[in-house]
Image: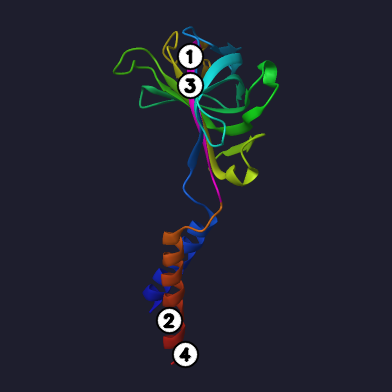
Amino acid sequence: MKKLALLATTAAFVGLSALAQAAPTTIITFAQNATTNTITATASGGTSTTLSGSDVAITVSGYSDSVPTPFTAFLNLNATSSGSASLVAGTDVFQPFDGTFTITSGAGGTGTNYLSGSFSDIALAGSRVAGPAGGFQASLIATDPPGSVSFTSDNIPASKLQDPSAIGFTFTALTQALNICGSTICSFTASVSGNGSASQAVPAPAGLAFLGIGLLGLAAVRRKVAV
């Protein structure tokens, strides 16, 4: 009896969770236009690292709005480490970062705000070993949950920018492998591409079905207890 009640309750809670959020949908995909490195990571005093890219000319190849793609825009990225870097399995480097970004029609974050936001997560990760195609890569990724991500846009409705959200920047052509200088990631430069995703809080059919199963199970348990 207890096992039946537990299963029914679990099904109900999972169904309610599915009601609260839908699968994330990609809302923007982009890549820089330049063939040179546009992102700079600067280590300071062996304790913190800043990431910056100013007025990086990009091409947006995917966008969750009526604006036809592809179109050109400007990316501004600023992030600062919020904790120490760590080495995992002898090859992978991780470090948490807090930051902001803007993707706009004008330089300096001006004009139409296609997508802007802030993020905080254990975000910058990369390997000290070159990838299969050669060269070093790293990723700045934040998801909500477990971290925090928030978006604003002049074009995309707020209802399409709800949690869970994620923003990711892929850094390629790093001038060196990721290494730790003191307690922070060492300086480097890189090229950039990226994407963002978000969900709408809408009922999911599978969640509704599972919720129904859970509620029916709870009702059956109550009837047996009453008898």
Residue at 67 percent across and 34 percent down: it is 154
Q: Are marks 3 and 1 in contact (CB under 8 Å)?
A: yes
Q: CA distance from mark 4 to mark 3?
A: 61 Å
Kindly state the secondary structure of the residue where label 2 is placed: helix
Seen from the viewer's position, the closer of residues 18 and 32 is 32
Q: Which residue is mark 4?
A: 226
- Per the rendered image, the range of residues in magenta is 189-200
Seen from the viewer's position, the closer of residues 91 and 165 is 165
Q: Nearer the viewer, mark 4 or mark 3?
A: 3
Q: Which residue is mark 1?
A: 191
Tell which circle, 4 or 3, labels the residue nearer the N-terminal end: 3
| Residue 95 counted in the magenta span | no
Q: At label 1, which amino acid type do we have?
A: Ser
Q: Which mark is residue 42?
A: none
Q: Position of residue 203 (x, y in %)?
A: 51, 58
**Res 127 → quadrant:** top left
**Res 214 → quadrant:** bottom left
Q: Which mark is residue 221?
A: 2
Q: Which residue is mark 3?
A: 193
